[in-house]
Image (cartoon, rainbow, N blue to C red):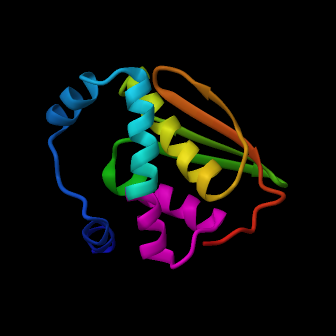
Amino acid sequence: MEWDRVAENAGLVVISPVTLSRLMGSLTVEQAEALGESIGDEVWMPIVLSKYGEVTLVSTLDSIDLISRYMGRFEFHRTAEGTKNVVTVRHGGGRKWSAFYLGAAKSIFKKHLGLDFVHHMSEELVTIEFDAENVGRTR
């Protein structure tokens, strides 16, 4: 029920994994990253606002965890030591999906939360590291 309400509010539709793979396969790595950025703006951030009413680091991380659990497209992990944070997205989709998730991270963490981060990207993993000391912005 929780996911159904969130998905409906965000205008999400069901698409088969085969179709999704074919669509991603038709993109370049750069196009996949740009798509991730637009999905971050147009889908993921509205999910945060719909579910929590504000964009904060906590609401954003909770929303990414929710998306991970219910969509099943990636695994989400976060570690924090003081203000130092590491967010990891693990998936099985290859470099284009990594670029997609990196693009989404740019939208979510840089644009909407104002966080600078360093990233590492491989075929099945995207990791971003940031210092949350100055986070507190809300929208």
Q: How many marks?
A: 0
Pinpoint residue 112: horizontal percent, then vertical percent. Answer: 60, 58
Residue 92 sits above or below residue 43 on the image: above
Relative placement, left or right, of 63 versus 136 is: left
Q: Residue at x 45, y 55 (%)?
A: 41
Task: Classify residue 133 by image quadrant.
Answer: bottom right
Residue 93 counted in the magenta span: no
Relative placement, left or right, of 128 versus 68 is: right
Q: Residue at x 82, y 60 (%)?
A: 134
Pinpoint residue 139: horizontal percent, then vertical percent. Answer: 60, 72
Q: Residue at x 71, y 68 (%)?
A: 137
Q: Residue at x 46, y 20 (%)?
A: 123
Relative placement, left or right, of 57 versus 13 is: right
Relative placement, left or right, of 19 versus 84 is: left
Residue 46 counted in the magenta span: yes
Residue 130 sits above or below residue 32 on the image: below
Pinpoint residue 9: horizontal percent, then vertical percent. Answer: 30, 72
* Frontmost residue, 74 versus 128: 128
- The magenta region covers 43-66
Residue 124 sits above or below residue 35 on the image: above
Secondary structure predominantly adopted by residues drawn in magenta: helix
Task: Classify residue 33 by image quadrant.
Answer: top left
Q: Quarter of the image containing the N terminus?
A: bottom left
Pinpoint residue 13: horizontal percent, then vertical percent. Answer: 19, 56
Residue 129 sits above or below residue 111 on the image: above
